Amino acid sequence: MSHQPYASLQIRDFKLYLFARMCFTMAWQMQGVIVGWQVYEYTGDPFTLGLVGLAEVAPFITMSFYGGHVADVVERKKLVIAFTILYFICALTLLLFTLPFIHLLSRGHVYPIYVVIAITGIARAFVAPAITAFFAQIIPRELFSNGIAWNSNVWHFAAVSGPAIGGLIYGFAGIIPAYSTVAGLMLLAIIMFSMIASRPLPVHDHHDSVMQSLTAGIRFVFKNQIMLGALTLDMFAVLFGGAVAMLPVFAKDVLHVGPQGLGILRAAPFAGSILMGLAIAHRPPMAKAGKNLLWALLGFGISTILFALSANFYLSVFFLFLTGVFDNVSVIIRGTIVQLLTPDHMRGRVSSVNSIFIGSSNELGAFESGTAARFMGLVPSVIFGGAMTILIVGITAWFAPMLRQLNLRRIQEEHAPQKG
């Protein structure tokens, strides 16, 4: 069968899904830039940027297993809409905090922001597994890898434009218009999700207790060596190799480019991801997926180190761009593994495990980066993170031959529906 790179885009509900995710992601990424710059401007302490990540990840991890369980017993579209509304309310609250007649924030006193970010962590624990499981109900199984590639492209496009727009609006118009734009995009996402046709939950004969259901996802992942290996490798690479949390410090104290430059720095990895995602949509790297995954994460670690050593804005943007190029290979390979090997009735719970492995490692990585920057210094801490990523890739390549020999094309053919 010839590869059709645009097959999934012919499905109306999938296009609505992509547009809604684009608006949601743009708003989320804009909010990250605005909050990061605002907190660092108030405190002048890179450790407080790590606390922003910790404020989101703690409730996210705490609630994720329950969020996955709910996504497998409640209609997924309803969950996506409900918790996108909660994100919208949080955006409005952050906007309220910045109004001139509200005096909740002051120098060194940004705790109300941490509270709102913690609430978004709870919302994310429910929306992440629901939106991933909903994806699998919108497009047919044989188009999963193609849909994942386009989903990743749209997500990264939004992640490019979100930080850039957020930084530009904050820098030229101010924080109130910036937060207002975040709220407007969240509202648009709610409308687009509402226009997608509802899907009933997959039929499943087994009736587990709540406790059994809560742990079913993690038991499933730990019994599957390929899935566990890919998730573990990606988790530690993201945990140690990410420099995004420290970008406000690089922008202000190293590169001296202000919030506008911060937006460009935040957008650079996602720009690289978009170009790689477009290439993967046309030429999926699935036959040698395991080797491609390891080489890509090795490149990610090297690019991170080179970014830390750069004192030139344009070189820094280029090296961040490369981290996005390498990272998206891992994102698409991992996403294809999870979607292909997960039974329909367990998608919410397995997705919650995936979110804990990968999603939480972004925020824990932010906390690790902030802590390391305080004790080691900014540049040495990022070099250390990149070096740890390279070390983890080497260890995994040596001790995980099954992952090294992974052929996703063969797995996809084995799980494709049989023609009668």
Image: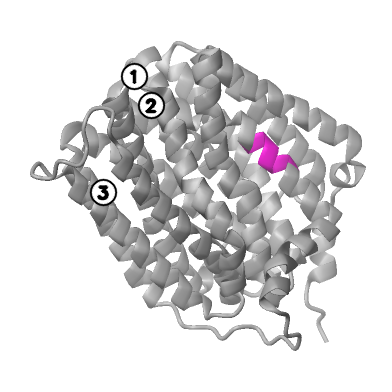
Q: What is the magenta range?
A: 233-238
**Image check: 28 left or right of 244?**
left
Residue name at image x 67 percent, y 35 percent: 237
Instruction: From the image, state whether disc 3 or disc 1 is nearer to you.
Output: 3
Q: Is residue 2 visible?
A: no
Q: Amino acid at mark 2?
A: Pro
Residue name at image x 59 percent, y 36 percent: 325
Q: Which residue lies under the disc numbered 1?
A: 252
Image marks 2 and 1: residues in contact by CB distance under 8 Å: yes
Which of the marked residues, 2 or 3, is nearer the chain's N terminus? Answer: 3
Disc 3, SS: helix
Q: Main secondary structure of the magenta part?
A: helix
Q: Which residue lies under the disc numbered 2?
A: 248
Q: Quadrant of the N terminus?
A: bottom right
Q: Nearer the viewer, residue 10 or 306?
A: 306
Q: Amino acid at mark 3?
A: Leu
Instruction: From the image, state whether disc 2 or disc 3 is nearer to you.
Output: 3
Disc 2, SS: helix
Image marks 3 and 1: residues in contact by CB distance under 8 Å: no
